[in-house]
Amino acid sequence: MSATPPPAIGSQGAVGLRAELVAVVITVDEGHPRVLASGRPPQLPAGPLRQDHQSLQDGVRAFAARQTGHTLGYVEQLYTFADLGRGPGADRVVSISYLGLTRARDDVSAWMPIYDLLPWEDHRHICADAEPDRLLQEIETALGRWTRSDAALEEERRDRCAHVFGHGDHPWRPELALHRYELLWEAGLVGESPTGGHPSGLTGPSMLHDHRRILATGLSRLRSALQYRPVVFELMPQTFTLGQLQEAVEALAGQILHKQNFRRLVEQQHELVEPTGGTSRATGGRPAKLYRFRREVFTERQQVGTKLPLPRAR
Amino acid sequence: MSATPPPAIGSQGAVGLRAELVAVVITVDEGHPRVLASGRPPQLPAGPLRQDHQSLQDGVRAFAARQTGHTLGYVEQLYTFADLGRGPGADRVVSISYLGLTRARDDVSAWMPIYDLLPWEDHRHICADAEPDRLLQEIETALGRWTRSDAALEEERRDRCAHVFGHGDHPWRPELALHRYELLWEAGLVGESPTGGHPSGLTGPSMLHDHRRILATGLSRLRSALQYRPVVFELMPQTFTLGQLQEAVEALAGQILHKQNFRRLVEQQHELVEPTGGTSRATGGRPAKLYRFRREVFTERQQVGTKLPLPRAR
DNA sequence: ATTGCTTATTCTCTAACTGAGCAAATGCTA
DNA sequence: TAGCATTTGCTCAGTTAGAGAATAAGCAAT
């Protein structure tokens, strides 16, 4: 109730700037998550903010509609970056990034498999008994070298690697995708690292500017959202089997789930899905019941979501 | 993969714009959460983005340092709004909002109690046996009127009110603060609603532009973060009792917690805090052990957090 | 000194949840 | 009919979470 208005954050030096939207549009296709990206180097769709967009979300939706021929089922703001202009006197660029999910993909050439771009994020073939993945093995070795390269920071780096990459008895946490990317970036293990990118193509291709980082942000956010909200259904057809639903979640989470427990969790949220009565015999085994997402409960349940029955230990 | 770069989101009509930072700086003082805000109508600190800020976070941190004399312990980007310029031809304004937490407050006049601005968000006096809060009673009545005012939307509105405000057997969820504000806004129950603000001062004073909405966004985000990450400690003194810690969490969550279970949760994360050996007898009863936050584990644990032992039913 | 009040601290109990896996059901194919 | 693949139903044990009893340790008033 003070009478004095607070001083402004900056009282001088406002600069000319440009604003652009960057979209991370994700879909999933037969167990393969894909992102709208193309070009060499690959880049996410982006463009200047237009005057005629009523809101930022509208801008992203309008664009996605033009690109995919279908509307985005889910749109969420990710993060806003403000790079200093490249070169002195250049305008500053504010990049507002969005995550969007969509079902339909007409032009397959514009969609890149996400795990081509972030190959260490797919853990679906990691089982408790199998030998560890070769890529992850090499990354662990390289991270170990980086960890030991600075005695003062060694302890902290070791903890961080263990926590983020699930070494030792730490669990692998799918939603830490962004933290993993940032760690690899700091360790000089991705091509776009400032400290000399890794020589081999170990960690997959770089993208334009910081687009790979933005993609990792989107993947992290999506994997988090999977645990709280029914966002998978935006990627599913009208009717689906629980097996298909699980396949989609596994693709996005990059991790295998326990089938019976997944079923239990989905059915337990009893109003989330309902059987249509039909069955599908596409999978070769016993025909599976078809379900429908009850979109009616979506608005009130935006925060409820689908929990992931992750396996306890590795 | 594909050789054609994706088309831009907008290919024409880029407009002049201004970018500003808006800060939601929160502290807690003897059970009362406060936000840096002042003026009539109250406004959050805001100002143009300056050229000399290396990054957006730097801008917010630099400002907060000037304002409070202390650095922000925690900074998180909230949301970016893009209002169409007021009036035709006006520049568009991009508002990038941040949440910041800080311990020290020198100039008490610049800090407003958050629950003066969002009075329905404080549930600390709600007990299972006590009679319901008068304010919430009135809000429920007014929401009921709004719900019944449109037969076509009645069902959906009723569900939404129940879910967001915890009517019926739905639990009250502290982190839905933003959803509650948006619902009140739509229902015309806050002063800044377009559809004729509520006549009485039922829901507290409006703020400048959409600042109350931004504040609600910050509160929601903070309450969510409380559950995943050890952010409370940014608001605590160097050493503290578990009672003080709980008081701070309760103030921010706006809800009473079960004392014994809160203690269990904190101690259970065994490396998060450690006893200093000292005791405090400030509270009148048995002297309490003093604890220290183990900042060493902070970096690796950014995602672990303090769970809230909320009471099961209302 | 004793009583009473206040808050801190330790434990116990119970219901619910979670990870894991066995086994039956139901289709197809050889 | 046997074999295979997948779905579906169920059990079991370990863990977590909400609730509250009981005890400990200080202060103030009697």
Image (cartoon, coloured by chain):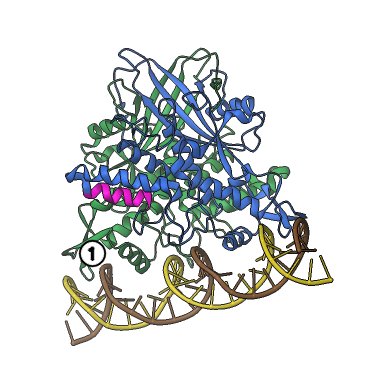
Chain colours: A green, B blue, C yellow, D brown
Image quadrant assignment for residue D20: bottom right
Mark 1: amino acid: Thr
Provide residue A95's location: percent of width, then percent of height.
42, 27
Rendered position, D30 above or below B215: below
Q: Is residue A104 magenta?
A: no
- Give the side of residue B237 with respect to residue A178, left or right: right
Q: Is residue B162 found left or right of B100 in the rendered image? A: left
Percent across and percent down for residue A119 are: 44, 47
Residue A301 shows in the view: no
| Residue D13, image x, y percentages | 50, 79
Please give left or right for residue B228 compared with residue B268 in the image: left
Counting other residues with Cα less than 10 Å from the Cα at mark 1, is it few (<14), some (14-19), or many (20 or more)? few
Work out whether residue A77 or residue D3 is closer to the camera in this orientation and state it: A77
Residue nearest the observer in this picture, A281 or B221: B221
Residue located at (27% from left, 22% from top): A52
Quarter holding residue B199: top left
Tell whether A29 sits left or right of B61. left
Write down the residue under mark 1.
A283
Which residue is at a point 47% across and 54% down the rendered structure image?
Answer: B126
Q: Position of residue A293 (x, y in %)?
A: 24, 55
- When asked about the image quadrant of residue A137, the answer is bottom right
Of residues B302 and B181, the one nearer the viewer is B181
Q: Is residue A132 above or below residue B62?
A: below
The quarter of the image holding the N terminus of chain B is top left
Q: Quadrant of the C terminus of chain B?
A: bottom left
Q: Can residue A101 be spotted in the picture?
A: yes
- The secondary structure that most of the magenta stretch takes on is helix
